[in-house]
Image (tube, rainbow, N blue to C red):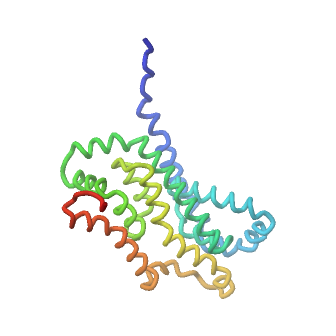
Amino acid sequence: MTTPAPPNPVWRQRIPVIVIALVALIGALTVRDYITFEALRDNREALVAFRDANYAATAVVFVVTYIAMVSFSMPGAILVTMTGGFLFGLIPGALFNVIASTTGAIIIFSAVRAGFGRQIAARIDASGGKIALLTRAIRANEIPVLLSLRLMPVMPFFLMNVLPALIGVRLSVFAATTFFGIIPGGFVYTWVGAGLGEVFARDETPDLGVIFEPNILGPILGIALLSLMPIAVKAMRGGKGPVE
């Protein structure tokens, strides 16, 4: 009879989360001083020259860097998104940004779920109360709720990567809602980045609040509300499940 392998100690499961937390802390204290609009403006000519001479390498380095920043929850994601537009244009810049951001989100989601998610999810289910009710509500409507939360800029990106892992959301659902949910916002900031050349020429600062302009935020909120329609239909049908 084969003796089953002993389970991994809890501390080993939490090593990825510990590493992410340490790198995030170091980044918050050091890297944020270098990821600034001024740094991009001062180094724009060198970046453009390197891109023109090494386009494929620049694209790979950019995507890998963006993935690392999201994975370790480092500051400056909006500026990096704009840099993608500045270096590569709206297309393929937006595609690079969305793929990198989604990949980084999946990495931190997986690390948190492996280290804490299953245990905490079980405790939440057993605890009862408002938190358990909220968790069950999200699970009952995972896709529309998570998609709407990605579309609407009401929760920090980091929290939206961690919370689903803690309540047992499936990886496939998390990945899909993240990818499609960040497309509108990523498109907007990539578009702003694509116009940075003119901003630099006028010696101005880009408007980072552009996503809150009514003509931009309105359609995004409309998409978010549309994503919640299955919940409304389900409620009207008495909670009988998806429309056939």
Q: Which residue is drawn at 44% across and 49% down?
A: 171
Q: In this view, does 12 lie above or below 176?
A: above
Residue 7 vs residue 236: left or right? right
Against 128, residue 218 (above or below) is below
Residue 98: where, in percent of width, then height? 55, 64
**Residue drawn at 74 percent across, 59 percent down:** 57
189 or 46, nearer to the observer: 189
Left or right position of 242 against 195: left
Q: Quadrant of residue 221?
A: bottom left
Q: Could you tell me which quadrant the N terminus lies in? A: top left
Quarter of image, res 96: bottom right
Q: In this view, does 107 lie above or below 159?
A: above
| Residue occupying image coordinates x 37% and y 59% | 143
Q: Residue 142, position in %: x, y?
A: 34, 57
| Residue at the far bottom in the pictured view | 202
Q: Which residue is drawn at 77% across and 66% down?
A: 50
Task: Report the label total.
Answer: 0
- Residue farthest top in this picture: 1
Q: Which of 76 and 64 is in front in this view?
A: 64
Q: Which of 12 and 104 is in front in this view?
A: 104
Q: Residue furthest right?
A: 53
Percent from the top left, x then y, of residue 200? 66, 82
Residue 126: x, y in percent?
22, 42
- Which image quarter is the C terminus in? bottom left
Q: Which is nearer the eye, 15 or 161?
A: 161
